[in-house]
Image (tube, helix red, strand yellow):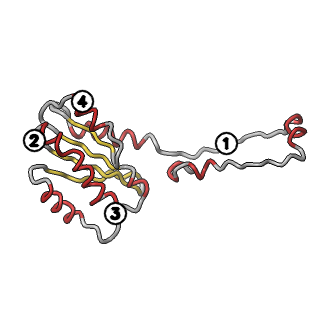
Amino acid sequence: MKSLFHMSEFQEKFKKSFPEISIEHYTTAFGEKAANVFHIKIDSEERLKNNWKQISNFIAMNFQRHLEDEFEQFNIYLFYDQAFPVSKELKYNIENDLFSSRKIVITEGEDFNKVLDDYVVNSLSSFEHTQTDLSIEYSQNAVIKETLFGKKLRKKIKLLKRMPSIMKF
């Protein structure tokens, strides 16, 4: 994160913008990288309905844009925590919004720590890469060699440039 960014300033600004909503920030380390988790407590379905997009936008503009690490930019989780039932339609709309972060609605009876483990810890741990030694035997195929000999290939496809850097090994 840029050195000019201060979490305390972010939290003060959030409280001014959303005085009746509480927010907590956590980081979950994965080696030298980190996932950022925001635990947002809202006291009514109506307030959730009226504020979830603004909260998401606020975090994107006042937090996410300050992140320099690509892994951290793409691993931001917003947990909207309610002690009441939420309509299926509202929950669907929030959790399927693809802008800036992964959003999860926690409703009554669900434990934040368990949901956190299910969505963040388990999903990120599945991306761990372990290197293994592969020995591949190669032998020429006479038919392919004869067909391609003397031919000029016109177009090279560079797949690695199209893939996000997190996918490159």
Label 2: element kind = loop
Alpha carbon separation for disc pair 4 and 2: 18 Å
Q: Please give the residue where the numbered disc 3 appears in the rendered image.
A: 66
Label 3: element kind = helix
Q: Earlier in the sequence, mark 3 or mark 1?
A: 3
x and y percent of residue 13 in the render? 17, 62
At 23% from the left and 28% from the top, the residue drawn is: 88
Q: Please give the residue where the numbered disc 4 appears in the rendered image.
A: 89
At 33% from the left and 36% from the top, the residue drawn is: 96
x and y percent of residue 60 in the render? 30, 55
Please say if the residues under marks 4 and 3 sit with CB atoms less than 8 Å apart.
no
Indicate the amino acid at tag 2: Asp
Alpha carbon separation for disc pair 3 and 1: 40 Å
x and y percent of residue 126 in the render? 44, 40
Q: Earlier in the sequence, mark 2 or mark 3?
A: 2
Q: Residue furthest bottom?
A: 4
Alpha carbon separation for disc pair 4 and 1: 48 Å
Q: Please give the residue where the numbered disc 2 appears in the rendered image.
A: 43
* Quarter holding residue 9: bottom left
